[in-house]
Image (spheres, rainbow, N blue to C red):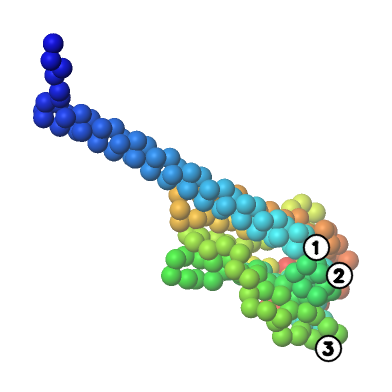
Amino acid sequence: MKARGFSLVELLLASALMAAGLALAFGILQGAMRATASAERLASHTDQLRSVQGLLRRQLADALPQAIDPAAGIDELRLLRLDPERVEFVGLMPGTLARGGVYVQVFRLEHRSNGLALLFEYRMLTPEGVLPAERPPELLLEGLAEARFSARGFDPDGRPGPWRDRWERLGELPLQVRLEAGFAEPRWRFPTVVVPLRHSLSGLVGLLPEAMRRDPRGEDET
């Protein structure tokens, strides 16, 4: 009996099935690669966010009850300045980030084309004043759709007061500093950071001189 070969139709059909199988396999591979890349980006973003929030917590928690400007008189004895886009204070810098010692440190928000960016800058504080910055500001995060700093201290009755978007009390650190933010990328989240200040004098505000418990407009801040 004579063996029968494949017809042209059968060969075309087999080729079409093989091409469809390869296309399906390639599509699955591409999808897996995209999923892997997305997971890696999310993991990298999570690690970066964890590091940034850790830096915020460490540096703010150890803010010192020391004047930002050592030459300022008692009427301008600022231990911390805060508005919705910036917080400035005095604290220790580890040797891994700078030369070590006491620095004026600033976390601030900057408007950019892709949204808000969170920057960190620091300058050494000496008895003669603040030295020029040793390096450009560090970019911590970018792509924020919204962000704001706030702070609160104790009310006169000794209870934590409301959150305020400005801290203007003289000679006093707030009880807590907060950063609320959100990313433009909907998959990414920014857990709100609330940092208690270890050296806060808010609870001792009643012991401070009267001149140190008033803001520049002469209004009682306690």
- Give the residue number, with chain letter if any, for mark 3: 128
- Residue, disc 1: 62
28 w.r.t. 75: above or below: above
Q: Residue 104's spot in the image, x, y percent?
A: 75, 75
What amino acid is at disc 2? Leu
| Residue 163 visible in the picture | no
Disc 3 crowd, CA 10 A, few/some/many (<14, 14-19, 20+): few
- State whether residue 184 is above or below residue 170: above
C-alpha span from label 2 to label 1: 21 Å
Q: Is 63 displayed left or right of 161 in the figure?
A: right
- The secondary structure type at the circle numbered 3 is loop
Residue 165 is left or right of residue 126, and the answer is left
Residue placed most toward the observer, 75 or 194: 194
- Name the kind of residue labelled 1 in the image: Asp
Mark 2 or mark 3: name the one nearer the start of the chain. Answer: 3
Q: Percent from the top left, x then y, of residue 118?
A: 58, 66
- Residue 41 vs 67, above or below: the answer is above
In space, the residues marked 2 and 3 are separated at their CA atoms by 25 Å
- Determine the residue positioned at 78% across, 67% down: 96
